[in-house]
Amino acid sequence: MTARKPLVLVKGVPTQLPAGDTLDYTFPDTTQLLTAVNGEAFTLSAGFPVYMNTDSPSKFMVSKNNGTLPQARTVALVRADIPPSTLGDALIQGKHTLTTGQWDLITGGSGGLTPGVTYYLGTGAAGAYLTTVEPPPGSAYSTRVGEAVSTTTMLIGIEPPKEATSPTYYTATFATATDAGSPIYTSAPSTVSQARANAAGTVEVVGLSAAAVGSGATGPVKTNGVLTLTDAEWQARNEGGSSLVAGTVYYLSIATAGKITTTPPTGVGEYLVKIGTALSVTDFLIEVGPVILL
């Protein structure tokens, strides 16, 4: 009786191994290419995320998360440098392998990709075409591009852009330039300003700025939950200039707009507003309390 060869799963399908069998199967290359003309006025470097220009569907354009849905619709990553007005290829799916230096040009990092980390479409600024940080709610769109399997190889898995929205965030226009972590209040319809505990008109805190936002620009406001910033960013928002202290309650500053303090106001006619509690030097639990007139 001839012994039957063992069954193995090949791509999920039970498969009989042939004579001289080996488990070292090589599967077909599933990489798919898209060919089009570079519609930009500059060279599209290898790894650039691109979308198809709706005005001229045969042209690649740089894809970016800048609040415009068409530009957030990433379709592929450039395979190799494509000069302006030149035909070239981009990868729709599969593995894309470049040098660490080429990936650094795309991500703004150093040493190539971070294995096991998911990459998202970035803002499109130099060195920020791809990012490991999923855009926070209220910051336009979130577009997953793929996952790094090594410092040089990305497994492309592009998903349709989705609006980055959440009940803990909303988008508003900032009346003045505002640093991340600043307590803010609504100063006009759809407009916010930095809060301060010295007047009735500036103490109704609605949340904290979730990012640094320029004067007149729109940006995300986080109303509750945990806001994570760098130690340096929190030091800049803390009236004492020191790091957050885990377990400590912070209040709205009476001395400086847009800052928090561990020292609650105590003077008659001043306003006491709890902002939240530090969980670590980088994490802050937003717990805006009622306004109390002392």
Image (cartoon, grey):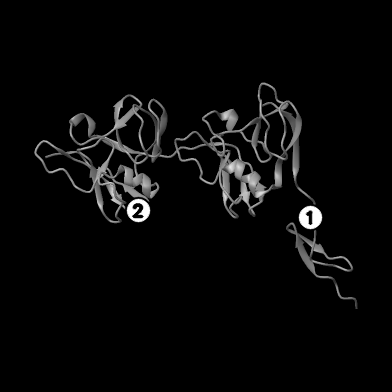
Q: Which residue is mark 1?
A: 27
> Viewed as shown, does residue 119 lie left or right of 194?
right
Quadrant (top left, top right, bottom left, bottom right) of the N terminus: bottom right
Element type at mark 2: loop
The quarter holding residue 89 reads: top right
The structure residue drawn at horizontal position 67% and vertical position 37%, both measured from the top left corner, is 45
Question: Up-down: is 87 above or below 116?
Answer: above
Residue 145 appears anywhere in the view: no
Q: Which residue is mark 2?
A: 281
Position in image of residue 166 (x %, y %): 43, 39
In primary-sequence order, the first of circles 2 and 1 is 1
Q: CA distance from mark 2 to mark 1?
A: 48 Å
Question: Disc 2 or disc 1, which is closer to the eye?
Answer: 2
Q: Classify mark 1: helix, strand or loop.
A: loop
Crowding at mark 2 (Cα within 10 Å: few <14, some 14-19, many 20+) = some
Nearest the eye: 290 or 89:
89
Residue 246 in sight from this viewpoint: yes
| Residue most extreme to the bottom | 1
Residue at image position (64%, 46%) is 101
Residue 165 horizontal side relative to residue 94, left or right = left
> Which one is in front, 260 or 287?
260
Q: Tag 1: Cα neighbours inside 10 Å, few (<14), some, or many (≥20)?
A: few
- As drawn, the label of residue 97 is none
Q: Position of residue 251 (x, y in %)?
A: 23, 44
Q: Percent from the top left, x then y, of residue 171?
A: 41, 32
Q: In front here: 70 or 251? A: 251
The three-letter amino acid code for the residue at tag 2 is Val
- The type of residue carrying mark 1 is Phe
In the image, residue 225 sits, relative to residue 215, either above or below, namely: below
Residue that extends furthest to the top in the rendered view of this protein = 55
